[in-house]
Amino acid sequence: MSHHIPDPNKSVNLTIDGIQVTVPEGTKILEAARKANVSIPTLCDHPDLCRRAVCRICVVECDGKGKLLAACANDVWEGVSIVTNNNRITNIRKTIIELLLANHPQECLTCPRNTDCKLQSLAQVYGIRETVFRHEAMNRQSVSGNNALVRDMDKCVKCGRCVEACQTIQTVRAINSSHRSVNYRITTAYNQSLEDSPCVSCGQCQTVCPVGAIYEHDQSAEAWAAINKSDCRTAVQFGKTLCAELDSALGLPAGTASAGKAVTALKRLGFDRVYDAQFTTDLAAAELSHELQNRVKNNGKPLPIISCCSQSAVKFIVNFYPDLVANLSPCRSPWEIFGSLVKEEKTTAISIEPCISNKKRPGQPSDNEPDLTLTVKELARMFRLAGIDFAALPESPFDSVKAGHGEAAADLKAIKCLAVNGLGKARTILDSIRKGECDAVLVEIRSCPLSCL
């Protein structure tokens, strides 16, 4: 094992499939290949996670010696000649994929990740229609989950992405690996349910999962049922900031989706009212500003106020920092404000949210909450089902909200505020609050890391 520390200021010259490449010392083979516009397939690699070299699909040959190296986990070196694709490498990759498929449920058409599955894509690229390995009958594990997430671990390819996202990035540590060899598996502690685990439903595990082992609890069927009720009006809240995510979910060029087109599409789905999420966001900011101003002036309740963008951040504090629960903002979130406003109109309220943690628990009281919460991916599936050509839609305005309350936000320019992305990074701020070392009076915690994994 080498203890050499790479010098990023030093350049390394190499060839990849005959292409001359110069990269900084310490660059992984996979990264160097991408710089040369050479595609190396991979299943376990993710740009925001460490290199585990688990799947071995990215193996390459170096210097014609026949030795195979994992491109995601090995650095380049001066003068090396790398071959990323030949008959031997192709057969090895096909064998790895066939072995994975031999122990994988053959349910692609009914899987929530159909057409968005890395294993399925790799099988298509390598032309795998059948496998030489016998597909054994599987004793299916029960599909489990909570109101936000669903786990189907028979589909797990054991890449370890979800474990790192939960353990290292979010530091929730609800899931981990257990056992060895053929019994190796990804599971919760003592194989308990997500409801009984420390899981806060931040959703980062399903974001990084390359297959359908962990996915969001789809409530689009309930949304369709609400829309088709003849004796019920339906209202939906949509934010302009979700347009880029909608482009990605629909496979459209960046900038195709706009707020105006989203309004038109939602009306064509059957929603009676489409409201701008910015309105409730402004109301929530006003409530928070006045609460903060009162605390600063009166010195009664603890500071700093901790404002959370989602229910997962709130649950994170309740689970891991119960002594700071009093610091949580008592103000309503935009999600809750929308629910309370629309309920005044006796309308079924559906909110489109970027975070799955705001999904409602079935049977949960909904006096001050939307009746349903959908993610952008669920909304995109509804658009596809309705046959809506998003690119050709005209623009439409949002409906106006009748609200007789809400004041302008107080002037808080002189007040120190902090915002942190990701629960792992939030620990640093929360620890400083616990020690009395944080001089901010407002801390905003956003569950998702800035890079959105």
Image (cartoon, rainbow, N blue to C red):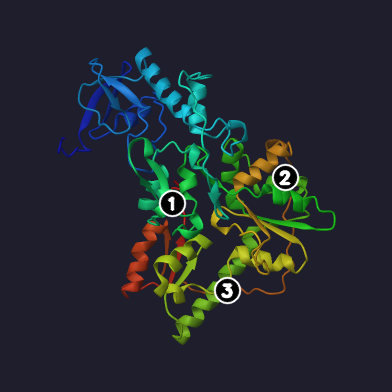
What is the C-alpha distance between the residues marked 2 and 3? Answer: 32 Å
Point out the tag, 1 or 3, that comes first from the N-terminus: 1
- Image x and y of residue 348, in percent: 74, 60
- Image x and y of residue 394, in percent: 74, 42
Point out the tag, 2 or 3, that comes first from the N-terminus: 2
What residue is drawn where x is 60% and y is 66%?
A: 282
**Residue nearer the viewer, 246 or 122:** 122
* Residue to which mark 1 is pinned: 191
* Residue to which mark 3 is pinned: 287
Q: In this view, does 304 lie to the left or right of 400?
A: left
- Image x and y of residue 260, in percent: 69, 48
**Residue nearer the viewer, 216 or 247:** 216
Point out the tag, 1 or 2, that comes first from the N-terminus: 1
What is the C-alpha distance between the residues marked 1 and 2? Answer: 42 Å
Q: What element carries label 2?
A: helix
What residue is drawn where x is 43% and y is 80%?
A: 302
Q: What residue type is labelled 3?
A: Glu
What residue is drawn where x is 35% and y is 51%?
A: 168
Residue 420 vs 395, above or below: the answer is below
Q: What residue type is labelled 1?
A: Asn
**Residue nearer the viewer, 139 or 448:** 139
* Residue to which mark 2 is pinned: 265
Q: What element carries label 3?
A: helix
Q: Residues within 10 Å of mark 3 (few under 14, many from 20)?
A: many
Q: Residues within 10 Å of mark 2 (few under 14, many from 20)?
A: many
Residue 11 vs 295, above or below: the answer is above
- Image x and y of residue 386, in percent: 74, 39
